[in-house]
């Protein structure tokens, strides 16, 4: 890929060995956690857990991010592509049911290089767990490397996406990205035990005061992507954190009524496979500890 970074739709076009773009990430890989994670959707983290690699930095840096310690404050450790590859194999040896790249967009090129070293040794699926704000050309470069795409669909309104994530074009970009992901993976493959082996699952976090925007997002998503082509996960784990206090309308938890209005609408759209989250998940206990140290 080009020396100047245009991996994501921000198109910063900067040399990351000399300066930092919107994601605030260097050219070398920075990660904050490697380990088994049991709190993804059941079809993703079944068994001993999903083998997660949490990358530092983010091309969205949402004001309410629950992982803001790494997305905005860049907590983490810089490693080589070779170490990244080794960590994948270690996770497989630990019993991980997949290799789950969390917030990977700004390191997509390095992930490809690492997978080139070890993909012939991996016997478990790879998961690209992202914010949905993806560059189509980057996704095309990932074709054949990713078994499961796990993108967010955060917003419909340009005004809302600009306010909370600094990108007024979010929905238009995300829908095209989801369509490309679904093209690559095909219809979701779920085995007899309910384990996802391939496909695209679209996640949506219902924000307080924003359920109407959630409904519009799904109503318009299915105009581009057929419900039979993807799975969905509707989440209610929101709790105020990071900069939420500066936005009174989201400085509280999502109510059950708000959440169920979205769930009930999505149920009418014809998705064949989906996941609903329990309200008890809206707490800090489910945020992992970002404690990666190389060699441990």
Image (tube, rainbow, N blue to C red):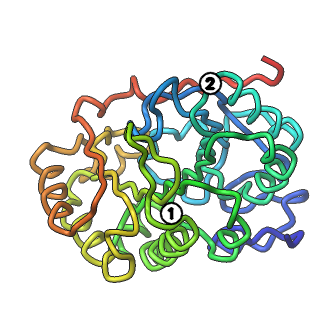
Tell me: residue 287, above or below residue 252.
Answer: above
Residue at left offset 38%, top offset 37%: 193
Dot 2 surroundings within 10 Å: few (below 14), some, or many (20 or more)? some
Q: Earlier in the sequence, mark 2 or mark 1?
A: 2
Q: Nearer the viewer, residue 146 or 189?
A: 189
Q: Identify the residue position indicated by label 2 in the image.
A: 95
In the displayed orientation, state which residue is furthest to the front. 192
Q: Estimate the spatial distance between the alpha carbons at disc 2 and disc 1, rounded to whole Å.
A: 28 Å
Tell me: residue 152, above or below residue 95.
Answer: below
Residue 286, disc: none
Q: Is residue 170 visible?
A: yes
Q: Position of residue 259 (x, y in %)?
A: 18, 50
Q: Identify the residue position indicated by label 1 in the image.
A: 132
Report helix, strand or loop for mark 2. loop
Residue at left offset 31%, top offset 76%: 222
Tell me: residue 241, above or below residue 148.
Answer: above
Name the image quarter holding residue 212: bottom left
Q: Which image quadrant: the C terminus? A: top right
Give the number of marks.
2
Q: Position of residue 115 (x, y in %)?
A: 79, 49
In this picture, residue 74 sits left or right of residue 49: right
Name the image quarter holding residue 154: bottom left
Report helix, strand or loop for mark 1. loop
Residue at left offset 78%, top offset 58%: 20
Mark 2 vs mark 1: in front: 2
Q: Position of residue 278 (x, y in %)?
A: 23, 35
Q: Is residue 73 visible?
A: no
In this picture, residue 90 sits left or right of residue 213: right
In the displayed orientation, state which residue is furthest to the bottom. 223
């Amino acid at each position: 890929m080009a020396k100047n970074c245009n991996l994501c739709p921000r198109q910063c076009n900067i040399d990351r060995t000399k300066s930092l773009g919107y994601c605030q990430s260097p050219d070398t890989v920075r990660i904050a956690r490697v380990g088994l994670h049991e709190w993804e959707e059941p079809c993703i983290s079944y068994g001993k857990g999903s083998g997660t690699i949490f990358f530092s930095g983010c091309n969205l840096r949402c004001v309410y991010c629950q992982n803001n310690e790494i997305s905005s404050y860049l907590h983490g450790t810089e490693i080589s592509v070779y170490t990244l590859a080794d960590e994948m194999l270690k996770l497989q040896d630990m019993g991980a049911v997949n290799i789950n790249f969390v917030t990977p967009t700004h390191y997509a090129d390095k992930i490809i290089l690492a997978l080139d070293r070890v993909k012939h040794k991996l016997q478990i699926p790879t998961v690209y767990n992202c914010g949905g704000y993806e560059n189509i050309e980057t996704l095309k470069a990932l074709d054949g490397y990713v078994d499961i795409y796990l993108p967010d669909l955060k917003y419909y309104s340009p005004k809302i996406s600009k306010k909370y994530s600094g990108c007024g074009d979010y929905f238009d970009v995300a829908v095209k990205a989801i369509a490309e992901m679904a093209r690559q993976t095909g219809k979701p493959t779920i085995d007899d035990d309910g384990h996802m082996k391939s496909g695209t699952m679209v996640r949506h976090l219902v924000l307080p005061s924003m359920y109407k925007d959630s409904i519009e997002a799904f109503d318009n998503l299915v105009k581009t992507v057929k419900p039979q082509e993807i799975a969905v996960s509707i989440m209610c784990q929101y709790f105020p954190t990071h900069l939420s206090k500066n936005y009174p309308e989201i400085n509280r938890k999502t109510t059950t009524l708000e959440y169920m209005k979205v769930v009930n609408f999505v149920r009418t759209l014809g998705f064949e496979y989906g996941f609903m989250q329990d309200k008890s998940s809206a707490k800090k206990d489910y945020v992992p500890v970002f404690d990666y140290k190389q060699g441990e």
